[in-house]
Image: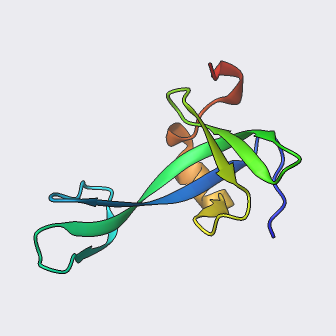
Amino acid sequence: MIQFKVGDPIVYHKPKSSFRPGPRARQVYPLAHGEAYHYVVDKFWKVAKVNDDGTLVVVTRTGKKHLIEASDPNISKARLFQHIIYRKRFPILNAAR
């Protein structure tokens, strides 16, 4: 399991479904009858708190907080390249609400 600490930038690969995937959608494929699509959108968050029970409090760029399991397979630490390229999409932890 990956060890996280406060301030770590993470990329959350959020699975979604809709009739029209947005421009940031990846791994797009049609659902059973072709009426909708399933896809993944990358979310760029930072770890605000690491809980003892194996959960993480993460903060979004807009200040929203989410509680997620540290063992969630959709989480990955942001690589240096991702952190540089998408730096404006990661939140600034001190400005978090």
Tell which of 69 and 58 is nearer to you.
Answer: 69
Q: How many marks?
A: 0
Q: Which residue is drawn at 21% across and 76% down?
A: 31
Quadrant of res 21:
bottom left
User: Could you tell me which residue is drawn at 49 percent across and 50 percent down?
Assistant: 43
The percent position of residue 58, horizontal first and vertical second, equals 66, 40
On screen, residue 26 above or below 90: below
The correct choice, above or below, for 83 with respect to 94 in the image is below
**Coordinates of residue 17 in the picture (x, y in percent):** 28, 61
Percent across and percent down for residue 90 are 57, 40
Q: For the view shown, which residue lies furthest in the bottom direction?
A: 32
Q: In this view, does 94 lie above or below 21?
A: above
Q: Residue 65's quadrant in the figure?
A: top right
Q: Where is residue 48 in the image (x, y as percent from the top left)?
A: 74, 36
Q: At 84% from the left edge and 60% from the top edge, which residue is drawn?
A: 3
Q: Which residue lies furthest to the right in this view?
A: 52
The image shows residue 92, relative to residue 43, as above or below, that is above
Which quarter of the figure is the N terminus placed in? bottom right
Residue 35 shown left or right of residue 1 in the figure: left
Q: Which quarter of the image is occupied by the C terminus? A: top right
The residue lying at 80 percent from left, 66 percent from top is: 2
- State how the image is colored: rainbow
